[in-house]
Image: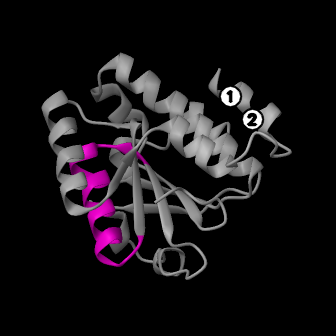
Amino acid sequence: MLCDRSNSSLLIIDIQEKLVGAMPAVVVEQVIRNTRILIETAKALSIPLLLTEQYPQGLGATVPELKAHLPAQAPPLFDKTCFSGCGVQGVQPFIENPARQQFIITGMESHVCVLQTALELHAMGRQVFVVADAVCSRRKLNYRTALERLQQAGVIVTNTESVFFEWLRDASHPQFKALSKLIR
């Protein structure tokens, strides 16, 4: 039940310019900060990243604050109009990869695209972790009910620091000292 860096992929769902503008500012800052921490950690530990953008023509691209931290070789980006990231053409090789059974999810909105993607991945037999402090909704009630529903379905609700420390596993990890600066 722990995140395993050799078995994980980081899935960033729809953290886009116009969606960010619709979210509570304090919450958005936290989601972007924590997603950035997970991106930086994933890059350092060679954990694959995937991004989705919901109707980017209308909602804009992934926010610059995250784009600036993406790996030099851009991760796969999937444009979508369906709410679940699982139904996007071309995503199947990534979600069906037998070497990567865990999906760590950040993004927007908790009760729509995050929820539908997480539930579909879980139904496919993948181990899904939704990072509670790296997802959000416009309304607090939608956020809370989404996390409750995910937990009831068997999805693991976690937080950024838990994922961080589970990926590293040990303070003697060669990158622990450098990476631990991200969470201070």
Residue at image location 65% in from the left, 20% down from the top: 184
In this picture, residue 148 sits left or right of residue 32: left
Magenta span includes 7:
no
Q: Give residue 96's position: percent from left, percent from top.
A: 48, 81
Q: Which amino acid does label 1 sit on?
A: Leu
Which circle marks residue 49 in the picture? none
What's drawn in magenta, residue-wise? 106-126
Work out which residue is located at the far top of the displayed protein and give it: 26
Residue at image location 60% in from the left, 68% down from the top: 7
Name the residue beneath numbered marker 1: 182
Residue at image location 72% in from the left, 45% down from the top: 170
Is most of the magenta stretch helix, strand or loop? helix
Query: Circle 1 sits in a helix, a strand or a loop, which is it?
Result: helix
Residue at image location 32% in from the left, 61% down from the top: 118
Magenta span includes 108:
yes
Name the residue beneath numbered marker 2: 179
In this picture, residue 143 sits left or right of residue 171: left
Q: Give residue 68's position: percent from left, percent from top.
A: 67, 36
Q: Can residue 82 be seen in this view?
A: no
Vertical relation: 136 (above or below) 114: above
Task: Please report contact status of discs 2 and 1: CB closer than 8 Å, yes or no.
Answer: yes
Q: Give residue 2's position: percent from left, percent from top.
A: 51, 56
Query: Circle 2 sits in a helix, a strand or a loop, which is it?
Result: helix
Q: Which of 29 and 47 is in front in this view?
A: 47
In this picture, residue 4 sits left or right of residue 27: right
Q: What residue type is labelled 2?
A: Leu
